[in-house]
Image (spheres, rainbow, N blue to C red):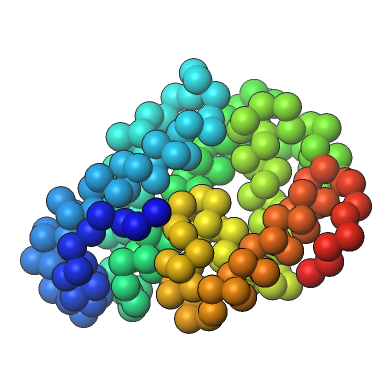
């Protein structure tokens, strides 16, 4: 799916990362609809009575993006990949905090093998996926980045390849291996695919 963004977004991102605050002012209206689309995709996976709404998620991500000015933006796909990561972090933090409140203030440590059983709600599933994705990132950051960009960020294979500066076939191959690894990590079922 192509992102409906004017070609000058890369210039605006670079100007913003170099300290031009007017570039941020020009950038916000251009990317607002895409951030809304990303947030809507995340919220669609949440339970219907979730306290956070799409607009609140976009707002929180925007506040964190403003703090990320020191990043050296590569292009629009890189911007959306970072935005997707921030939204995931916001939802996971919210889920962990809500779970801690329900359980008397402390989250009980559960081995990764047991998370599939414990993960009965969308919040718990998100936390289990985040934990598994963090485990994957410890030994293969590129595969974790591909999952984040494709699954959470909604980036195409081509956009992901552009951000990571790898071939399209590398993204496809590593995406498939990462999905199999994550499935095994969360469900505890062994698959033939090994990282």
Image height of 142 relative to 6, above or below: below
- Asked if residue 145 lies left or right of residue 191, the reply is left
Image height of 56 relative to 83, above or below: above
Counting labels gives: 0
Q: Is residue 63 visible from the viewing direction of this image?
A: no
Name the residue located 86 percent from the left edge and 40 percent from the top edge.
114
Instruction: Where is residue 133? Give x, y as percent.
Output: 67, 56
Q: Is residue 136 visible from the viewing direction of this image?
A: yes
Most extreme residue toward the top is 49
What quarter of the picture does the N terminus occupy?
bottom left
- Asked if residue 139 lies left or right of residue 193, the reply is left
Image height of 192 relative to 17, above or below: above
Name the residue located 24 percent from the left edge and 72 percent from the top edge.
10
In depth, the one of 178 and 110 nearer the eye is 178
Instruction: Where is residue 129? Give x, y as percent.
Output: 67, 47
What quarter of the picture does the C terminus occupy?
bottom right
- Quarter location, residue 126: top right
In depth, the one of 189 and 97 nearer the eye is 189
- Quarter location, residue 180: bottom right
Name the residue located 50 percent from the left edge and 64 percent from the top edge.
157
In depth, the one of 68 and 129 nearer the eye is 129
- Asked if residue 9 lies left or right of residue 58, the reply is left
Instruction: Where is residue 125? Give x, y as percent.
Output: 67, 37
Name the residue located 73 percent from the left edge and 27 percent from the top edge.
120
Instruction: Where is residue 164? Give x, y as percent.
Output: 49, 76
């Amino acid at each position: 799916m192509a992102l409906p963004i004017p070609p000058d977004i890369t210039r605006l991102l670079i100007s913003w990362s170099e300290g031009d605050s007017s570039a941020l002012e020009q950038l916000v209206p251009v990317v607002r609809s895409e951030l809304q689309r990303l947030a809507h995709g995340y919220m669609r996976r949440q339970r219907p009575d979730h306290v956070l709404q799409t607009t609140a998620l976009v707002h929180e991500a925007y506040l964190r993006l403003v703090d990320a000015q020191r990043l050296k933006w590569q292009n629009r796909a890189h911007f959306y990949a970072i935005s997707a990561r921030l939204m995931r972090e916001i939802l996971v933090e919210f889920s962990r905090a809500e779970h801690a409140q329900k359980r008397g203030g402390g989250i009980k440590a559960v081995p990764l093998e047991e998370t599939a059983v414990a993960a009965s709600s969308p919040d718990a599933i998100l936390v289990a996926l985040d934990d598994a994705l963090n485990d994957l990132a410890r030994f293969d950051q590129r595969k974790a980045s591909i999952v984040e960009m494709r699954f959470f960020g909604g980036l195409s294979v081509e956009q992901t390849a552009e951000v990571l500066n790898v071939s399209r076939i590398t993204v496809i191959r590593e995406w498939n291996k990462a999905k199999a690894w994550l499935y095994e990590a969360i469900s505890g079922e062994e698959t033939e695919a090994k990282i």
